[in-house]
Every structure is written in structure tokens, then in C-alpha cells.
């Protein structure tokens, strides 16, 4: 058993997914593989049922057997959610529509694969397990997707780096890249965000161009051009070097930074609006 104590509340604009990514990084370092994780502390009061579900559903990411929360003021709201399907983005009505015409025959002849495939067509559903429950029932277990970021203008990418066709009003970062690069861009987003953390300027956008060059944009508006990966100077090395020298260089410039080109082997180029001298 491992206890995790949460304090305070999530800052404005921060999502449950941001919290999960931070918790995952810390728990991987601590080591919670095959352990039960219990969340406690005053910070729980600000987490909704949906937020807690997001944290619990990430168990495979940080390796725990299970994660759970104590009974508190939020607990009575849980049955209300289960009546609507115990899912955040997928309703009971959608599931009923998806399985209509697929549940035919008797207990032994109903095609479980057909039922599963129907539900898997729903945009927020990642995985479905369907099994028979004697004497006349079907038990359906659904793993819903947890959105990590927007992908381009018309899709999302989940925490597993899988693209899916859905929309959300949540304040999420923007990722984009050539077809088939979703998993790699997601992996790099996490790595870039960790490297940039000391700056206190959240990563807002990660673009992998058709020429496989990397471009980043921070919440402050600063654009970082990393270029293409090379064996001699990987883009992560360039970014780490920039972060290391930032306090002694850009950090001392009072003007707002606009653009930094990190493609140079021994330095970087800077553009600052209205800078003279």
C-alpha cells in the first residue's frame, strides 16, 4: 500500500490530465508497481468524480494494481454518475444505439464480437470487453479514452498516443504531425514538457512538420524552432541546453521573447519584438 497526500487545488486552466501526468512521473520514480495506491489529503475536496476517475484509470501508466479514494463529500455523487453509465463522455443512450440490432439470438448464440465492435465505434471508447453472465445477461466493461491534447483542428489524441475523432472544450495543448506519428509526437510532448518545466512556462503546442522538424510554442507565446533530429545533436539535447542557459541569457531580457532558433550547434538565435541596440 502506498499513500499519496494531495494539498491545495488545481490552478486555473489546469486539467485532471495535467495532474495525472505529474503524479505518474512522481510515482514512477517512487515505485508503485503491483501496489495499491490510496489518495488522501485536503486536495481531494477540489477533485470531481470525473477527475478521480481520470486518476484511477491511469493505473497502468504508473504501474499500480489499483488506485482509490476515501469516502468523502464527493462520494454520494458517484451513484449519480453510474446511473448515466459511469462514464464521462459516453452515455447509456449512445451505447444502446451502438448495440441496436447486434444483440440477437439467445444467451449462447449472441455474437459478443459484434456487440463489442458496435460499442468500439463510439469516439470516446478505447477498449471494450463483453462477457456472458448466467443466466441471461451480458456484462460490458468499457475503457474510455482520456484526452491528452488536440490533434490538428479536428481530432484529439489520448494518453496512449492514439488519435480519435472527437472534440472537447477542455483547455488542452495542441499536437500535430504527419499521419502515423501520433504516438511519437505524444512521447516527445511529454519529454519536451519535462525538459521545459524549470522555466515555469507550460508547453502549449508541439508540431512535427512534413520534413520531420520540431517546432514548439510555450504559453507565453515564445516559439522554439528545434529543427530535425540528428545523431550529433538530438533535439532534446538542444532543448536541454537552452533551458540550462536561459536564466543567464533570455531570463535577463525584460522584453517579451518571440522566437528562438535552436538549430545552431553552438548557440541559438533570438528575436525580440521592438528590441533595439
Image (cartoon, grey):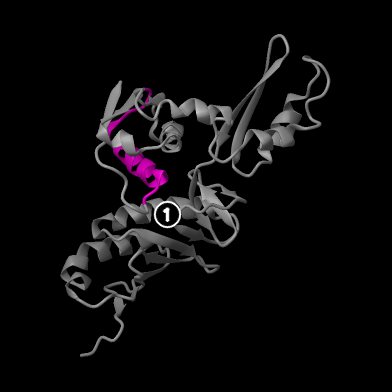
The kind of secondary structure element at disc 1 is helix
Name the quarter where the N terminus is drawn: top left
The image quarter containing residue 193 is: bottom left
Q: Is residue 172 left or right of residue 137?
A: left
Residue position for label 1 = 188
Q: Is residue 6 magenta?
A: no
Q: Residue at x 31, y 72 (%)?
A: 265
Residue 13 screen position, x and y as percent:
37, 54
The image quarter containing residue 245 is: bottom left
Q: Residue at x 66, y 41 (%)?
A: 122
Name the quarter where the C terminus is drawn: bottom left
Q: Nearer the viewer, residue 251 or 237?
A: 251
Which residues are drawn in magenta?
Answer: 14-34
Q: Residue at x 81, y 31 (%)?
A: 101
Q: Is residue 32 magenta?
A: yes
Tell how many labels.
1
Amino acid at each position: 500500500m502506498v499513500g499519496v497526500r494531495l494539498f491545495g487545488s488545481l490552478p486555473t486552466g489546469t486539467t485532471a490530465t495535467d495532474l495525472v501526468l505529474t503524479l505518474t512521473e512522481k510515482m514512477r520514480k517512487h515505485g508503485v508497481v503491483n501496489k495499491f495506491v490510496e489518495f488522501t489529503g485536503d486536495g481531494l475536496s477540489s477533485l470531481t468524480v470525473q477527475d478521480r476517475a481520470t486518476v484511477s484509470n491511469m493505473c497502468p501508466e504508473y504501474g499500480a494494481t489499483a488506485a482509490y479514494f476515501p469516502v468523502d463529500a464527493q462520494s454520494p455523487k458517484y451513484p449519480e454518475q453510474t446511473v448515466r453509465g459511469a462514464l464521462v463522455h459516453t452515455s447509456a443512450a449512445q451505447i444502446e444505439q451502438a448495440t441496436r440490432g447486434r444483440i440477437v439470438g439467445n444467451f449462447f448464440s449472441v455474437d459478443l464480437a459484434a456487440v463489442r465492435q458496435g460499442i468500439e465505434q463510439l469516439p470516446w471508447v478505447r477498449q471494450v470487453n463483453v462477457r456472458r453472465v448466467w443466466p441471461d445477461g451480458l456484462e460490458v466493461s468499457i475503457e474510455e479514452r482520456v484526452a491528452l491534447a488536440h490533434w490538428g483542428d479536428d481530432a484529439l489524441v489520448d494518453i496512449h498516443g492514439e488519435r480519435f475523432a472527437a472534440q472537447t472544450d477542455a483547455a488542452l495543448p495542441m499536437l500535430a504531425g504527419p499521419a502515423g506519428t501520433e504516438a511519437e509526437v505524444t512521447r516527445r510532448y511529454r519529454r519536451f514538457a519535462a525538459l521545459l518545466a524549470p522555466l515555469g512556462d507550460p508547453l502549449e503546442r508541439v508540431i512535427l512538420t512534413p520534413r520531420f522538424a520540431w517546432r514548439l510554442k510555450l504559453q507565453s507565446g515564445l516559439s522554439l524552432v528545434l529543427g530535425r533530429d540528428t545523431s550529433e545533436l538530438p533535439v532534446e539535447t538542444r532543448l536541454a541546453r537552452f533551458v540550462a542557459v536561459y536564466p543567464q541569457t533570455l531570463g535577463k531580457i525584460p522584453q517579451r521573447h518571440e522566437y528562438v532558433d535552436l538549430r545552431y550547434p553552438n548557440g541559438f538565435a533570438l528575436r525580440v519584438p521592438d528590441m533595439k541596440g
